[in-house]
Image: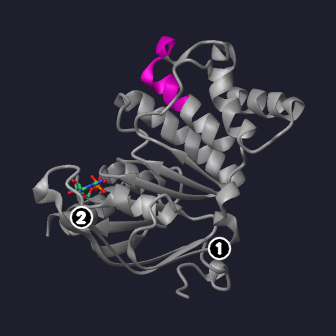
Amino acid sequence: MRAWKNNLFFMNPAISLQQVSKAYTERANGPHNRGLALEHIHIDIMPGEFFVLLGPSGCGKSTLLRIMSGLDVSYEGSVAFGEEASLSRISFVFQQFALFPWLTVFENVELALIARNVSAEARVEKVKNELKLLGLEKSAHAYPRELSGGMRQRVGIARALVTDPRVIFMDEPFSELDSFTAVQLRKELLDIWQKRRPTVVMVTHIITEAIELADRIAVLTQRPGKIKKTFTNSLPRPRHQRSEPFWRLEDELYETLKQ
Ligand code: ADP
């Protein structure tokens, strides 16, 4: 096992990928997309870590996230999950929010608990708490179509958090939002992560977002995606985009992506 921080030296990874490769054989997106999408990926993600996969569009970030989360099992190599990444302890936040339009905000969040057989009484309390945390109490009985993109993604995050997951997978969760809303939601997500310390694995193509959030950033190459370089980001939080260490790391990441 690799140590990335002294205090985590003796921990087992939450997720460990060894020599993972993935080829698409079907013609889902046209014949030019057949062939290798990921090649020889090796990553250990530690419990409580905020880990970001950064790379250009089409390099295989979402494919890698699906493999890491167990959604996609057709790959070569091995993926091992620690206790915290067991199926009942993981959750997802998607770019497109993925809410059920015929359910209210409350019901959308509650659904995650129904799927886990939580009692009705406990469900009400947990959902109320999570809606409060994300500033959604007043929208509890609204339907997704009545909400702004930012509010919908708050519901997506509340739904992911309500089960108290130990690992959260996020696929470009802020890319559909205006930049002001994205800044605010990133801040709130960080606050919650610092309090509860789940392992977070997030995909993004935005360098500043990666720096603002991540403990470590893995930069992927163009397709077939390989890990080009992994950066440890120990800038103190909150991280200010206008500070010198921030833009230095931004430059380094940009150069690595460009090569
Ligand atoms: P990213 O998330 O970095 O944009 P993806 O993981 O979505 O990249 O896709 C990686 C590559 O695999 C792209 O070239 C994409 O077109 C292709 N791809 C993704 N899903 C499929 C699929 N189901 N069938 C065939 N090709 C796919």
**Identity of the amino acid at label 1?**
Gly
**Identity of the amino acid at label 2?**
Thr
Q: Nearer the viewer, mark 2 or mark 1?
A: 2
Q: Which residues are magenta?
A: 145-154
The span from disc 2 to disc 1 (Cα, nearest Å) is: 30 Å
What residue is shown with label 1?
82
Q: Is residue 136 left or right of residue 120?
A: left
Find out whether the residues at labels 2 and 1 contact each other: C-beta distance under 8 Å. Answer: no
Find residue 34 and report its image quarter: bottom left
Where does the N terminus fall, quadrant-wise?
Answer: bottom right
Which of these two is toward me, 16 or 228?
16
Percent across and percent down for residue 183 are 44, 36
Q: Is residue 29 left or right of residue 137?
A: left
- Residue at position x 45%, y 18% from top? 148
Classed neighbour count for the residue bearing mark 1: other residues with Cα under 10 Å, few (<14), some (14–19), many (≥20)? some
- Residue at position x 62%, y 27% from top? 108
Q: Secondary structure at mark 1?
A: loop
Q: How many marks?
A: 2
Q: Secondary structure at mark 2?
A: loop
Percent across and percent down for residue 71 are 49, 58
What residue is shown with label 2?
25
Percent across and percent down for residue 256 are 22, 69
Q: Is residue 165 magenta?
A: no
- Residue at position x 40%, y 68% from top? 74
